[in-house]
Amino acid sequence: MLSMPRCAARWNRCFGALLLLVCLAGAPRAAAQEAQDEALPALEEIVARVEEKLRSIEQLEMTVELEQYNPADGSVTPGRGRVLAQFPNLFRFDWLAPDMLAGSILVVDRARNEAQQYNPIREEIIVQRWDRLAAQQNLVPDIDRWLALPDPADYDVELGGVAYVDEVPHYLILARPKADPAQRYEFLIHPATWMVTEFRYYDAQGRLTLRGVLSDVRINGGPVESRIRDLPRARVRQL
C-alpha cells in the first residue's frame, strides 16, 4: 500500500497521465488572426518541432496548475505543483496545493528504476520500484514522455486547428486512445516556442475531467540534480 492518501494517488494519476509540457509567450490577436487564415502546418511538422524542442531540454523547471472536474456536480478541485527535471532520467514533483497534499514530494530516478514518495504528515519516505508504482497508479513508466505529445502507436493524433488562450493563438492537437477512442485529450502548442502550454482531458461522455496549465517555465538553467534529490529528513521505508 502507498503511504499517500487516496486523493494524492488520484492526483498523481492525473498528473502522470497528462503532464506533457511547457512554456508560454504572447502575440497580438490581429497578427494571430492572420496566421490562422494562412495554411496550418502539417501535423507531422508540428509533432517534429515539438520533439525537436524536447530533445534540446537538459534541465526543466515549471509550475503546473491543475483543475479536476467532478462530472456529478460540476465542482472543481484545484491543485498546484512544481516540476523539476534533469533529462532524461531524473524527475521531481512538489505539491503546493491543495492543503492536504502540500509538502508531499515524488522523486523518480528512472535509471535506478526507483521512486521516492515523501509524506510530510507521517514524516516518512517510501522507496519502491518505479515500474511497480507506475503500474499501480496507471502512469506512463517512460516518464520523459510525460513532457511530449502522445505516442502515435497508442493514440490516434490529429490537428484540430487553432485555439486561443488569452488572445494568443495555439495549435490544437487532438489525441484519442486507440484502446478507448471515446476519450479525448487536447494539447495547445504555442507556435513560437513549439511547446505545450495547456492540456485538457475529456472522458468517454465528452465531459471535461482535467485541465492543466503550465507556467513559470525555466529551461536549461543549470544543474538541478542535487535539488531534485534533496528530501527532508524522515524515516525511510522500503517496499
Image (cartoon, rainbow, N blue to C red):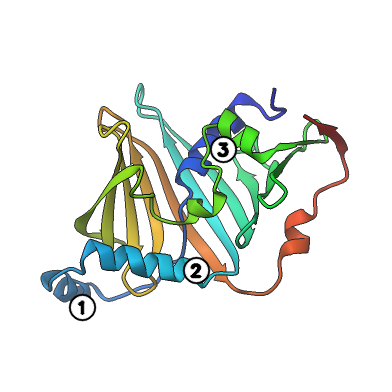
Q: Position of residue 172 (x, y in %)?
A: 26, 57
Residue pointed to by mark 3: 12
Q: Name the N-terminal-most of marks 2 and 1.
A: 1
Instruction: Categorize mark 3 by other alpha carbons within 10 Å: few (<14), some (14-19), many (20+).
Output: many
- Res. 55 mark: 2
- Res. 63 mark: none
Q: Is residue 49 above or below residue 43?
A: below
Distance between mark 3 and mark 1 Cα atoms: 38 Å
Q: Which residue appears at 60% of the width and 55% of the height?
A: 83
- Disc nearest the viewer among 2 and 1: 2
> Is disc 1 placed on a helix, strand or loop?
helix
Residue nearest the observer in this picture, 228 or 149: 149
Q: Position of residue 126 (x, y in %)?
A: 77, 35
* Amino acid at circle 1: Ala
- Res. 31 mark: 1
Q: Are marks 3 and 2 in contact (CB under 8 Å)?
A: no
Q: Position of residue 64 (x, y in %)?
A: 52, 52
> In the rendered view of the protein, which quadrant contains the C terminus?
top right
* Amino acid at circle 3: Asn
Q: Name the N-terminal-most of marks 3 and 1.
A: 3
**Position of residue 40 in the picture relative to residue 200 (left or right):** left
- Disc nearest the viewer among 3 and 1: 3
Distance between mark 3 and mark 2 Cα atoms: 25 Å
